[in-house]
Structures are given as structure tokens and as C-alpha cells.
Amino acid sequence: MTDFPSLQTQRLEMRQIQSTDLENIFKGLSNPLVIKHYGVSYSTLEATQEQMAWYQNLYNTNTGIWWAICAKLDGTFYGAAGFNDIHPQHKKAEIGFWLLPEYWNNGIMQEALTKICHYGFEHMKLHRIEGFVESENSNSKKALEKMDFLHEGTLRACEWKNGKWIDVDIYAKINQL
């Protein structure tokens, strides 16, 4: 990949996550409502540097690309979304996303994911985008279903989290472009 692609919709700008986003990333990935079904969390601003390095490493190694989701009008930070675990041979990637709770239920994630998926199919030449969602995470499952991701199955008791086994649902969208 060369220059980091910025993506825009009518209301949103998806741009490269920057060092100045550290506090916003921490705000999201330390929020109990966000991390309840998310695989990553941080208890300090300093520890969140690990996540910042992860975003940059994905891009530097061509194994993923994540965007900050912001208001186009004033730059307000809403959350983050992108691809990781890119497999060039199989032309597939895993999608991930999170949004600060004060912006839930405003159509922001659907608007952002529509643009991000289009970028993945058209510019990255992906054939398949996969989403792995904890079975109890109804909000993320609804977001993917609104995007025409199909539920392909459930991995039962496949991850140990917070002292119990959890199920993970697999969703996928195939390139129709």
C-alpha cells in the first residue's frame, strides 16, 4: 500500500488513525459498553499505545488497514473500523469495528462500513470479508446483517472470556462488484 486512503461519505470522514487519537482510542477501548464484546481493552492511556502500534503495524506490513471514523463537518471522533488478517492468496480479510456509545443508533457504523467494504472490494480486490462476532453481541450482528453479511454459522464454546466459554458467530460478505 502506498498513501493511506481517506474515505468520505455525506456525513463521515474515515482517515488514518493518528497519535493524536490516543485519548479517543483509550476512551473507546476502556469503556465497559464498548469492550463488553470486544477482544481488546486497556486500563491506562499508556497501555493503549499498544493498540496504536497495532494499527500502524497492520498498515506497514500490508496485513490490515484501520480508519478513524469522524464527523466530516467538525472532525468529531466516533470510533474506528477496518480490516485485519488480510490473506492475499484467498483475497479475504476480517472486518472489525467499534463506536463510542454516545453515537450508537445513528446509522454511523452502517454508513462507515458501507464505504469501507466498498473500498475493500473495489480497491483491495477482496473477494470475501469476514466478521467474527460474539454471539451475545446483538448490536454488531445487526450492523453486519444490515450490510448484507450472511450468518454462516456459530463456533460453539470457542473462546474463553471473563471466566466462561463464549460462542462466536461467523458472518461473511462476498464481492458482488
Image (cartoon, rainbow, N blue to C red):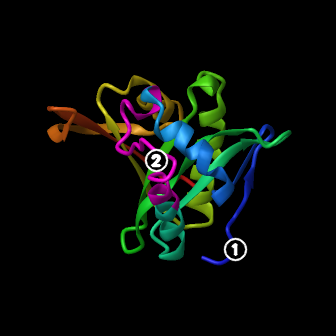
Residue 99, quarter of the rendered image: top right
- Local packing at callout 1 (Cα closer than 10 Å; few below 14, some 14-19, many 20+) is few
Along the line of sight, the residue nearer the viewer: 34 or 156: 34
- Local packing at callout 2 (Cα closer than 10 Å; few below 14, some 14-19, many 20+) is some
Task: Report how many numbered discs are placed on residues in the image.
Answer: 2
Q: Callout 2, which amino acid?
A: Gly
Residue at figure coordinates x 46%, y 32% from the top left: 34
Query: Is residue 51 covered in magenta?
Result: yes
Residue under label 2, please give it.
96
SS for dot 2: strand
Q: Main secondary structure of the magenta part?
A: loop
From this viewpoint, is residue 102 visible?
yes
* Number of the label disc, if any, that sits on residue 3: 1
Position of residue 70 relative to residue 16, above or below, is: above
Q: CA distance from mark 2 to mark 1?
A: 21 Å
Quarter holding the C terminus? bottom right
Along the line of sight, the residue nearer the viewer: 134 or 121: 134
Residue 163, quarter of the rendered image: top left
